[in-house]
Amino acid sequence: IKVSVNFLTFFLFILLNDPLIGVIGLGIRTFFGGYGIFNTPLMYLSIDEDELKNGSRREGMFLGVNALIHKPAQSIGPIIATLILNTFGFIQGSDTQPLSAIPGILILMFLIPAIVSLIGLVFMYFYTFSQLR
């Protein structure tokens, strides 16, 4: 639902240019964005499953690989956001922005989160636990 709402809000805002659409879209996206709280429990379920399969607890390895993936990703996100805003003419510190900056802001608010959530859904679809079958 979150992915659909993000795409729909982005395209409706571009077509109709009504700020109320953006506010409603953000509200719905925030409501359905709560699934992010399950990231840590899923990781610990994976650790438990690994212990059942291999007979030893290796959470240090899992947490290390998690940090190895997340730390660079946390650095890449702001770089991508800055590049998008600069491409669309965003003026830092300005009280008003040119009209060319609006699509860049919308891309960062709706399109990028929709794409990232969609990629996450693909991985979640193929992720199974043998103990839950």
Image (spheres, helix red, strand yellow):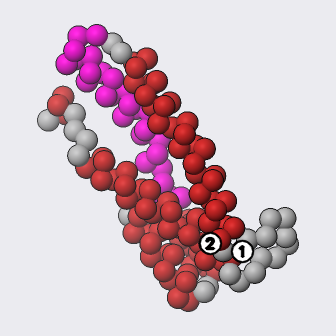
Q: Residue at x 18, y 28 (%)?
A: 131
Q: Earlier in the sequence, mark 1 or mark 2?
A: 1
How packed mark 2 is, by other alpha carbons closer than 10 Å (few <14, some 14-19, many 20 or more), is many
Where is residue 109? Give x, y as percent.
58, 65
Task: Give the residue type that dot 1 points to.
Answer: Gly
Where is residue 51? Give x, y as percent.
27, 16
Q: Please tell me whether mark 2 sits on a helix, a strand or a loop.
A: helix
Task: Give the residue type that dot 2 points to.
Answer: Gly
Q: Is 89 drawn above or below residue 32 in the view shown? A: below
- Label 1 sits on residue: 89
Quarter of the image that includes the N terminus: bottom left
**Mark 1 touches mark 2? (CB < 8 Å):** yes
- Nearer mark to the viewer, of 1 and 2: 1
Residue 16 visible in image: yes
Answer whether residue 62 is magenta in the image: no
- Label 2 sits on residue: 104
Question: Chief secondary structure of the magenta span?
Answer: helix
Where is residue 93? Give x, y as percent.
84, 65
Q: Residue at x 61, y 77 (%)?
A: 103
Instruction: Provide the residue span drawn in magenta.
Output: 30-56
Q: Is residue 55 left or right of residue 133?
A: right
Q: Quadrant of residue 48?
A: top left
